[in-house]
Each structure stands twice: as structure tokens, then as C-alpha cells.
Amino acid sequence: MKCKKCGGKASVNMRQHKLALCKEHYLEWLPEQTERFIKKYEMFTRHENILVAVSGGKDSLGLWDILVRLGYQADGLYLGLGIDGRRSPLGEGINYSHESQRLAEKFANHHGLKLHVVDIEKEYGQPIPVLSEISHRGHGKPCAVCGLTKRHEMNRIARDLGYDVLATGHNLDDEAAVLFGNTLSWSADFLLRQSPVLPSASGLARKVKPLCRFYEREMTAYCLARGIEYIYEECPFAEGAQSIYYKELLNKLETDRPGAKLTFYLRFLEARKSGELFVESHVTHGHLHPCTKCGQPTSAPDLCSFCRTIEKVNSVPAV
Ligand code: Q46
Ligand code: ZN
Ligand code: ZN
């Protein structure tokens, strides 16, 4: 297989685009495409300050790398969730959080970039697995509390430190799996909110997903070609997640019909934009007002669900 640009040996073959490129041209192509998506969806400009949520994985580190290479002002935010053997019921030997933090810091140091690190245990007294256990949210899995905490903290840091926009590394596989799940249940509220850009609203930072049109394997190829060291392991709690099952189903479809995943997602974005699928006014938006403790928007009468979770945890006497 030959590189379409130089005729040299191709190292990445993207069947869905009918495009094969050598390493050098792939490393040019991916940022160029990202720039195109940033402009197309009006995500941000070069005058704005971007906060990249960095997990230590390939997508978020790849995204940070691309934005910096494109000349954007992008700092990182790492959330220390405390998911590792020392302090969780997972057992010894699993050092997911420590290892991902090490790799995020290594990347930042190597490129001379600013990385904010927020340790959840230091901020709120307990790591995520324990917060989840004490608060009894999420049916024995910490993902509900983890997701709630990540959203809350990313928004808090973006707001408190004055960033214009929060960027996450969600790729096409992530977005297609979410879309598939929401379509199966026809969750109109969630479908309406699924977008490459969520504008800022009543105390919430603008959120963008510049990688939403790249396949997961394209991000893996980018990180390998750039020599970015990232954490290969998934969070141990991800095992058995419904989103992984949906990804496997979509991968089967993609094998038989290259490009199916991309078409599924892009046609949805087109239909959503044109208003073909939903009439926005039919979807009920709960009345939002600021949480009396943290100020972030909530539909609950006083505290938001994150602050309620932390209150509940603090009210349980220590053993
Ligand atoms: S980090 Fe957190 Fe994920 Fe781990 S505990 Fe669940 S939500 S699986 S993306
Ligand atoms: Zn080439
Ligand atoms: Zn709150």
C-alpha cells in the first residue's frame, strides 16, 4: 500500500476514507483535519484559553499534543481519582491513577506545558471508590460518582481559573457508542445534548470534542507515530460497561461495512442540526438555578447532586 501523497510506503490505511498515508504525512493529516473540525463546529479560536481534560490515555494526550502543534493556547487538567490498589477494594497491584498521573505529568514536563492536578481525596476527603461506597450511588460500581465528580470538577476548575473552553478527548468510537445507546432508548434529552460543541450556559463552561470524528485506532496510530507514552490499560471499573458492549457491536458492523460508524454519527449531526429529528421545544428542560454551595447549575431545590453526595459522605461517622 502506497502513501497517497508521496508514493512512499504507507503505514496507516484508513479504509473508511479510502486513504493510506506514510507516517510523515499521517502526522500532518490528522492535525489538519482537527483544525478543519475546530473551525467547522466553531469550537474556539487562537485567542481563547483552552483547558484540556487529560486522563493519561491516548485520546486526551493526543488531543493536547495536536492543539499545541496547531498553535492553540492549551493547558491540561488531570483529576486524581484515587483508583489504585492502595486505597480501593480493587486489591494490590492496580495502580491506574498513579500510572496515568505519571504519564500525564511526563508529557507536560517533556513539552513544557502547564498541567493542573486536582486530587479528589485531598479536596473531598476520600478517593472515588470510597466516595462511591459511602454514598451508595451507582449499584456497586463507582462510575456514577466518578462521572458526576469529573463533570463537576472540570467545570469548577475551568470557571475558577478563567478558561474559555473545556476540551475532552472523546473520539468517534466513544460518540458512536453513546449515540447508539441513546438511540436504542430514544432518549431525546440526551440526543439533543450530544454535540461536538456545547455552548456555555448558566455557570457551565463551553465543552468541545475536537476528536469526535476520528476513529479510536486513528488516535492510537497518531500517538504511536508521535512517540507519546500513554496508559494502555482501561480503568479497572470499565470492565463490563455497557458502552464497551456497544463499541464491540459497532466494531462488528464496521468490519463488514467500513465507514458505517462515521456515517451513523455524521448523519445524526446533520439531522440534529437541521431539526429533522427533534423539535427542541418538545424536550423538557428542567428549570436550572445555582447550587447554594458551589454555584453550579442544578434542577434540585438547593444543593446540586455532587454537593449532596459529598454532604452525605461527610455525615457518615468515620470508623
Ligand atoms: S474512570 Fe471513573 Fe471511568 Fe473508571 S470509575 Fe468508571 S467512570 S470506568 S471513564
Ligand atoms: Zn507520504
Ligand atoms: Zn453544588
Image: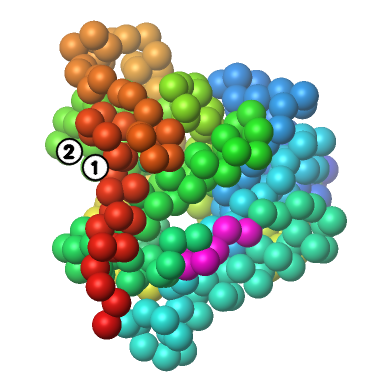
Query: In screen coordinates, is 311 left or right of 55?
Result: left
**Alpha-carbon distance for marks 2 and 1?**
5 Å
Report the residue at 25% width, 15% height from top. Answer: 277
Task: State which image quarter holds ligand 3.
Answer: top left
Q: Give whichever of 316, 7 is nearer the camera.
A: 316
Q: Which residues are magenta?
A: 117-122
Q: Amino acid at mark 2?
A: Leu
Q: Amino acid at mark 1?
A: Gly
Instruction: Inspect the magenta stretch and tell me whether residue 93 lies in it.
Output: no
Q: Give whichever of 224, 85 is nearer the camera.
A: 85
Q: Position of residue 175 (x, y in %)?
A: 40, 40
Query: In screen coordinates, is 238 left or right of 220?
Result: left
Q: Are marks 2 and 1 in contact (CB under 8 Å)?
A: yes
Q: Which residue is most to the bottom? A: 92
Q: Position of residue 74 (x, y in %)?
A: 72, 41
Q: Is residue 235 visible?
A: no
Report the residue at 58% width, 69% height from top. Answer: 100
Report the residue at 21% width, 17% height from top. Answer: 283
Q: Residues within 10 Å of mark 2 (few under 14, many from 20)?
A: few
Q: Residues within 10 Å of mark 1 (few under 14, many from 20)?
A: some
Q: Is residue 313 above or below residue 303?
A: below
Q: Give whichever of 208, 87 is nearer the camera.
A: 87
Circle 2 residue: 184
Q: Is residue 290 visible?
A: yes
Q: Is residue 32 above or below residue 224?
A: above
Give the quarter of the image for residue 240.
Answer: bottom left
Circle 1 residue: 181
Give the quarter of the image for residue 316.
Answer: bottom left
Q: Give whichever of 32, 46 is nearer the camera.
A: 46
Q: Does the numbered disc 2 mark a residue whose Cβ is under 8 Å from ligand 1?
A: no
The C terminus lies in which quarter of the figure?
bottom left
